[in-house]
Image: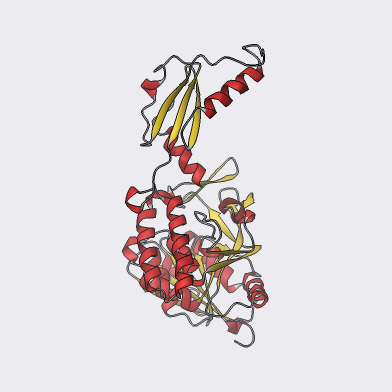
Amino acid sequence: MKGLPRFSIVICNYNYEAFVGDAIESALGQQYADDRFEVIVVDDGSTDGSRSVIDSYLSDRRVRAVYQENRGQSAAFQAGVSVAEGDYICLLDSDDVYLPDKLARVASKIAELGVAPDKLFMCHDLFIEDSSAGTMIEQSWFDVAGVSQLPDRLGLAHPAQMFPYSVPCGLVFSRNVVAAILESLPTWAFARGADGVVCPAAFLMTGEVHYLRERLGAYRVHGGNEAAGLANGRYTWKIDWRTRTPKTLRFLYEWLDVLDLAAPERSVALDFLFRFEHLGRRLSAARGLHEPLVSIVEMGARQNAARASGLQSHPRVVWQHELGLQPTCGAPESSPKSDLLRLRQAYEGSGGDFIVFLRAGDQLDREFVERHLYWHQH
């Protein structure tokens, strides 16, 4: 590929009349050669005034529109990618925006990486905008997603992460990579949050994801987001990823079978999928895995004192009781050293993979163990 890479910016819109103009403006405002990028706006059956807004930009030769009946986000992105002509695809939700230097900085990073033009999967960082206040919060997207703690290149052999990627406005793919994935997706199953399955599928296909640690767009949190919220100036998740895991895993295992990988590469990819599965759903005995055993030790309680509140949704819990353990070395009963020794004795006498220390009189809600195991995995 000679000269500057050519980009196709694919914007997906559904009933975001108030935002889609900003998204298109940010795409057209790129400080990049006009003849090296195009903007494709897919309207997914909007019922508001979105199409009038989109039509107002069609006089610009760089803009094309695709209008379709409402079929969901993955179908909308697929419709746009299918007519794209660029070497690389940049996705953009219609309520988000690019910074003016996005394409120039991405092109520079591509040249630096030297990755084959048909094998690129890249994520760049993003500002997170509190649209109600018109300001950016302190956290970046890479902070929220945990990417700030990862190397610049993540491979399949690295420890599995739940979602170490950007949202659509921070994603860049070789056109053939994202086209193949979107053509294979059962669109009815991924009508929203398409990035949650497209990104791990691209990771499996390319074997790596590269990170550009520059904030080149803004993910706008405005109250209508399905996945995002803000609390006290910090990002909060509004969805439970576990609800999407079964259908995502089903597609990814089928996708791996479709990929033409050599035996060693397939083995690495399959191992990654097994580890990813551990993060996303309860361990299944049918897959030769087991739920962790959790010991709950009642400290200073009479036997069965807290059992009434101890019925847990997690299936493998054993209740134990710290009874009659005496301090050693002459430590007074109430001293911190005594408390530490009692905890140590209780720990050494427990048999679980995890342990919970429960004080006399305290109670656990029914999902305490299950919830903490889930967050421990993440």
Q: Where is residue 361 in the image (x, y as percent from the top left)?
A: 47, 17
Give the image quarter of residue 247: bottom left
Q: Where is residue 206 in the image (x, y as percent from the top left)?
A: 51, 72
**Colour option used:** secondary structure
Q: Residue farthest to the front?
A: 329
Q: Where is residue 160 in the image (x, y as percent from the top left)?
A: 51, 56
Quarter of the rendering occupied by the N terminus: bottom right
Q: Is residue 234 left or right of residue 317?
A: right
Give the image quarter of residue 108: bottom right
115 or 198, which lies in front?
Answer: 115
**Residue 195 is at least partly visible in this image:** no
**Residue 202 is at least partly visible in this image:** yes
Q: Position of residue 193 (x, y in %)?
A: 43, 59
How many circles with numbers are drawn on the protein?
Answer: 0
56 over 194 or under it: above or below: below
126 or 281, which lies in front?
Answer: 281
Q: Residue farthest to the bottom?
A: 2
Residue drawn at x 63%, y 83% is 4
7 or 68, which lies in front?
Answer: 7
218 or 210, which lies in front?
Answer: 210
